Image: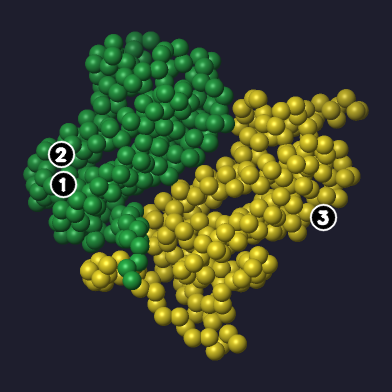
Amino acid sequence: MNPPPDHSAHREFSTLLRGEAEALRGWLQGGDAQRLARELAVILVGAGCYGAAMGWWRSPEQALFVAIKFPLIILLITLGNALLNAMLAPLLGLDLSLRQSLRAVLMSFTISAAILGAFSPLVAFLIWNAPPLTTGTSHSVAYALIKLTHVVVIAFAGIVGNGRLLRLLVGLAGGNRQVAWRVLFAWLAVNLFLGSQLCWVLRPFIGTPFLPVQFIRPDIALQGNFYENIFQTVVQLFRD
Amino acid sequence: MNENMPIPPQIPLPGSAQQFAARQAEPVPPPPPFPGQRPLGEDPAERVPINGIFGVVEAVLRQPRRVMYQLRQPGAGGLIAGMLFASVVCGLVYGLIIGSFSGHEQWWAAPLKFTGGLLVAMLICLPSLYIFAGLSGSTARLGEIFGLVAGLLLLMTVLLIGFAPVAWLFSQSTDSILWMGFLHLLFWLVATAFGLRFLDAGFRQTNARSTAGLKTWTVIFVLVVLQMSTALRPLLGRADTFLPAEKKFFLSHWGNCMESNEGEARSHR
């Protein structure tokens, strides 16, 4: 009698979370479509649930929009930088093909998305307990607490995902930690660079109480960029 | 009787024959890293199935390792359902004691809020525990983690039943909401500490390499339950509505309670 197949999905998910470099290295070699589909499903569901929890404070419509935008950003970063990541790896001493580097980055995002998904009920609970998002709330302790929670959860998910990726890269580099760190930093740099701009274009996430709920702000989406804004803020700080 | 029980054969991992063979080639997870850890099922008494609600309660109190072992066996769903059922019953009973302080609609509202709140808090925190377990290197399935959390809930509510006579006596002899709140909080913290000890012991049996994730989760769980008590207020005292109209964080609610209690005390003087 064949036992139910869900055990294998659990086992693979567990292997991914534990970051078992040996097994994950094997995954990079094979082109298992089912496994890829499962990873994509984790990203869609995990990041989607977290996005929904984040946008829910503003309105249910905003929750739906952010539930779509969050996984979309992850997938756009993965695909947008696929070629660059695949070129950087061999240049920095790690011989990886385009498919292998793409899968490695996708695996790390899958772990991060799973963590985000697991924290989404907690974030939703926090938001349920917060006062409604109004103009006054945006300067309150509740707003600061929710923002801080998002930063901590997303940072934790990112650190763990990249920590597992590093372990995999060390294995792929034959134990050479220097090469693995170099590749990880290069990938992180380009992913953060693209990711922050994507977030800028696809804003709002939490939403502003006095502005309408929109998927993106068409009038300002493509105006300026994330880094320009930071630069202007720094300049303003020094001027004041 | 237990000594004669044969050791059950190792349960093969499910999957097709090819998948099974492929899994055999995969690296074997390291043994539990915690020194002095006896493997579950080593003692034949741990392999005796747990039957009935009273059996479940007795096992979680006296033989926690037996519960942990049984949670890994096929058909553990019945055991988990039993633990949840017993937790609900114990929670409702303790909720009645909480409600007895104010009477009236709190006779039904307090048990409902207390039990429902604990169950919802458990469900909210379950996914993060599963992820923390995985990140810690644990090989436990979601069902086993769910079972361990159900065990935590059962142990917590059973211990609260033990505190119930004391809580009832105090609730009949004082009018201070603040004092009763403090007393229930104290009992809940003691009960939770024992429940978490059970969870920790179970967690260490799942091949987890560290308990840092569990410790983080413990903080999250305690915060969620404390916030739940504020979100579902009043559990003590009366109100016009079943749920509060105003959203508050628990620390701010506690601060307000203390201020109003000080005001009351001053007016009595």
Distance in Å between CA atoms under marks 3 and 2: 65 Å
Distance in Å between CA atoms under marks 1 and 3: 63 Å
Q: Is there CB contact under 8 Å for labels 2 and 1?
A: yes
Which residue occupies 57% across, 45% down? B121
- B233 on left or right of A98: right
The image quadrant of residue B25 is bottom left
Residue designated by label 2: A82
Marks 2 and 1 belong to one chain? yes
The image quadrant of residue B60 is bottom right
**Location of residue B138 with respect to A233 vertically, above or below:** below
* Tag shown at residue B162: none
Which lettered chain is shown in yellow?
B
Would you say residue A60 is visible in this rendering?
yes
> Which chain letter matches label 1?
A
- A39 on left or right of B243: left
Colour displayed for chain A in the image of the structure = green
Which residue occupies 42% across, 12% down? A211
User: Which quadrant is the N terminus of chain B positioned in?
Assistant: bottom right
Q: Amino acid at mark 2?
A: Ala
> Which chain letter matches label 2?
A
Residue designated by label 1: A101
Residue B268: percent from left, percent from top: 90, 28
Marks 1 and 3 belong to one chain? no
Marks 3 and 2 belong to one chain? no
Residue designated by label 3: B165
Local crowd size for mark 3, using a 10 Å CA cut-off: few (<14), some (14–19), many (≥20) = few
Task: Choose between B120 and A153: the one closer to the eye.
Answer: B120
